[in-house]
Image: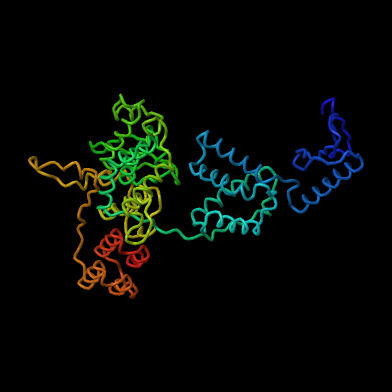
Amino acid sequence: MGADVETIVINERVRLDKRKDSPRWQARVKLASGEWHRFSTKTSDLDEAKDVALKFYYAADERLKNNLPQNTRKFRQVAEYACERMRNEMAAGGGKVVFNDYITAINRYLIPFFGKWEVVNIDVAALQKFDTWRTEQMGRKASHSTINTHNSALNRVLDEAELRGWITSSIRPTLLNKGVKPKSRGTFSPEEYKKIYTDLRTYHEKTYHPIARETREVLRNYVLFLANTGVRHGTEALNLKWRNIGWFTKEGERYMAVYPSGKTGVREAVVRDRTVRFLDRQREMNSALADMTLEEVIDAKIDDYVFKVRSGTKVDYYNLVRHFRRYLTENNMERGPDGKQRTLYSFRHFYATQGLVRGMTSDLLSSQMGNSPEVISRFYSKLSPRMNAELLSGRAFVQNTSDDAPAKPPEVAEAVIVAPVPVSELPTAAAKAFELFDAGKIGEAALLAALGVSRTGYVATEAITVRALASIEAGRLSEDGLIKVLGN
């Protein structure tokens, strides 16, 4: 210690220190880890200070014998260490994109509730109180995925505490998830999609606010990008940079691929050919790239965000959400026929359902979109995006026209082209059941009964599978109904 500090040695593991400018004694106790734990005795009396220090020393030894931490820290301090570690891992290129979600959860929910708690005191009862508080804060029961994120974030904090010896594995609470099970989001019909991208061409002209105009310009390209790539709205799409876009050649044909970083890490996703136009419009909005061609930008691996507004900043996530929600409200499109709410994330669902209708397998879409096939995976074989570049780029579904045929008019150039899927003729009863169901004359339960999904030996034919997928796309059949039709 310094010359201005008086030190009293009680034993080889306990010290008392007092600075000349302070009347109170500070205690130092050496823990089993070799770390010196410092704390104030809150007294200027030497005998009282010795008593406080020795009580901590003996209590720490007793805790060690019972496999408990000898000292602990406030949750806020441990959480800040955990956030710093995640930021450092991401900066070094070894972290995960989802760490950003964990840090947000820690700062928005965990620290506000647990901040002043000793991390060692977080147990099952504390977690139950947190769950009640979180429900009050959100105004609803948290979803299954939200709770998973919060649990993962809390585990990062507890890992940090255990690493530093502030808790032990024996007293760590088990984190459970009793959140609301996830439901599929609403989607759009091809007709609704066409209306949306058509309206968005001039939507920015309906406001005089400069930030709103810029945001709506990007919104048009952003919506088209989501609908033609299947990339996740938010972290995946908005963090995409020009260096994450590239070309590859297969059998003399060149295809574009993007490399978003999402829940499953970086993946390759082959985009539909028309996506080039949307990206080129984004390039033109960037003043630093306006004098370059899209080819030059991609070849140069520019380390800049794709979705930037004209003023030069990355488009704001919440502004995009706000303006798209406003558009849906203005056009009475917030919910689909199935009653499900539509959001920007619905374009991922739209991409998937259109892909299934065009004949893509669920395993192919799973590889392309970076998720699990789940519902109908056992009906299809596993294929990779690059092996099916013709499908994913849209070329396999563009109908050939003769040289003298009129070109496709610009107003439908951005629409999703759905090619008819060749299927065998449906059995008479099944065909009639679907006809009545689509006309609204029978409900889902009657449809399922007519198809005989509960009968022993029932097997969904390819024709019934495609017909059911068309019904779910139209917003008539529920996802639970689809699962029953498929025999799951």
Most extreme residue toward the front, as rendered?
208
Identity of the residue drawn at 22% across and 73% down: 429
- Residue 145 lies, in percent from the top left, at 49, 54
Q: Position of residue 80 (x, y in %)?
A: 62, 40
**Identity of the residue furthest to the left in this view:** 404
In this view, the residue in front, 78 or 222, is: 222
Quadrant showing the C terminus: bottom left
Q: Quadrant of the N terminus?
A: top right
Q: Count the marks: how many?
A: 0
Residue 435 is left or right of residue 236, and the answer is left
Relative to 217, is 180 on the left or the right? right
Which of these two is toward me, 206 or 370?
206
Q: Nearer the viewer, residue 187 or 159?
A: 187
- Residue at x 9%, y 43% (from the top left corner): 405
Colour mapping: rainbow
Choose top left, top right, bottom left or bottom right for residue 40.
top right
The x, y position of residue 375, in whole percent, is 37, 60
Q: Residue at x 33, y 28 (%)?
A: 297
Determine whether 92 is above or below 321 in the image: above
Drawn side of residue 68 relative to residue 21, left or right:
left
In this view, 343 is above or below 466: above
- Left or right, 238 with respect to 28, comes to left
* Position in image of residue 286 (x %, y %): 35, 29
Q: Residue at x 64, y 55 (%)?
A: 173
Q: Nearer the viewer, residue 474 or 151?
A: 474
Residue 242 figure quarter: top left
Image quarter for residue 87? top right
